[in-house]
Image: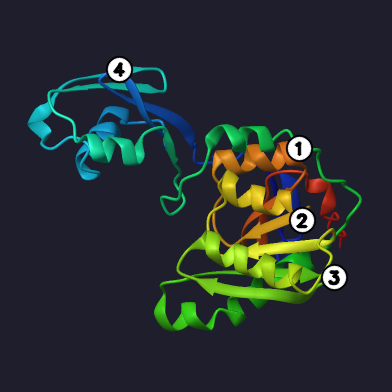
Amino acid sequence: TRKIDLDKNLDRFEYENVAVEAPIKVFLNGKHLATVMASPQNLAEMAFGLLIDEGVVPQPGDVVNVSIDKNEVWVESRRINLDRFKSISAGVIVTSCSSRTDFHRVIEELKMSPLPLEQRVEASDILDMAAELVKRSVTFRSTGGVHSAALFIDGAMEGFAEDVGRHNAVDKAIDSCLMKDVPLQRAVLVTSGRQPADIVLKAARCRIPISVSLRAPLSSGVYAADLTGVTLICFARGRRMNVYSHPERINPLRTI
C-alpha cells in the first residue's frame, strides 16, 4: 500500500492489513442455497443465522448438523420452508447493503481489458476532491443516514448524489454525467462508503480510472481494482490517503 501524508511530506509503501471478503457457499440438505460474500470466520454461526433469520429453517431446533469444508458450509435440517428456499436459492448475498448479483458474472467482468495508465493526478488534488465531497454532503451532515458519491473531471465536480444506499449514490452520480454525455476516461469517482468489488466494478465498467473513498477497502475491492486497472484510494481524509492499486497514476510528492 502506498501511503501519502501531505503534512509530513510522507510518500512510501508499507504493508497494511485489509479486511478479507470471500465467497462462502451454503448448502442445505445437499442443495446449494446461496453464496455469501463474507469474512471467512465463524462460518457455522453465519450459515445458521442466515437460515433462521431468512426463515428458510423454521426453528433453531430443526438444524441437526452443521459441517464446514474450507469455504463451504453444509447444513442438515429436519424442516425447510420451501418458499423461502426458492426465493434465496443460488443467489449471491454480498456485504454491501445485502444486494444480490451473479457472482460468476462478476468474476468474468474481472477479465475485462485493464484501463490505460497514462493519467496522472496530484495527491493534493485527490484530497481536495474528497474534501469537496464532504462539503457537498448536506443530507449526511443533517441525518447521518446516507451515502454520497461524486464524479470529478480535471478537478471539477460534474456529478453528485446522496442516497441511503452506497450503490444507489454511485449509480446516480455516474448516470448524471452519462446523461450529459460527459466523458469519463479522465474522471475520478469519490465515494463515502467502503470499497468491495462491486463498487470498484461500477467504475471499471464505465472506464473510470480512479476510485476514491473516505472509508476502507475490502480485499475483493483491492483484487478487482488490481485486475481491471483501477487506481483504488481509500481513507482519503484530511491530508492523508492510502493507494491500494496502480499507484503510478498518483504523482510522487515533491521533496522539500
Q: Amino acid at mark 1?
A: Met
> Where residue 4 sits: x, y (%)?
72, 55
Residue 152 in the image: above or below residue 249: below
Task: Kindly report the distance in space between the C-alpha atoms of the residues bearing marks 2 and 3.
Answer: 13 Å
Task: Kindly report the distance in space between the C-alpha atoms of the residues bearing marks 3 and 1.
Answer: 25 Å
Q: Residue at x 59, y 44 (%)?
A: 197
Residue 158 in the image: above or below residue 105: below
Q: Tag on residue 154?
A: 3
Q: Amino acid at mark 4?
A: Gly
Q: Residue at x 76, y 60 (%)?
A: 9
Of residues 226 and 131, which is closer to you in this image? Answer: 226
Question: Which quadrant of the rendered structure holds the N terminus?
Answer: top right
For disc 4, the marked residue is: 30
For disc 2, the marked residue is: 208
In the displayed structure, does residue 230 sit left or right of residue 56?
right
Secondary structure, mark 1, is loop
For disc 1, the marked residue is: 112
Which of the two labelled residues, at mark 4 and mark 3, occupies the earlier sequence position?
Answer: 4
> Where residue 89 sits: x, y (%)?
36, 34
Task: Name the mark nearer the viewer: 2 or 3.
Answer: 2
Q: For the residue carrying disc 1, how many other residues have a C-alpha within 10 Å: few (<14), some (14-19), or many (20+)?
A: few
Question: Which quadrant of the rendered structure holds the C terminus?
Answer: bottom right
Quarter-wise, where is residue 27 in the image? Answer: top left
> Where residue 216 sits: x, y (%)?
54, 52
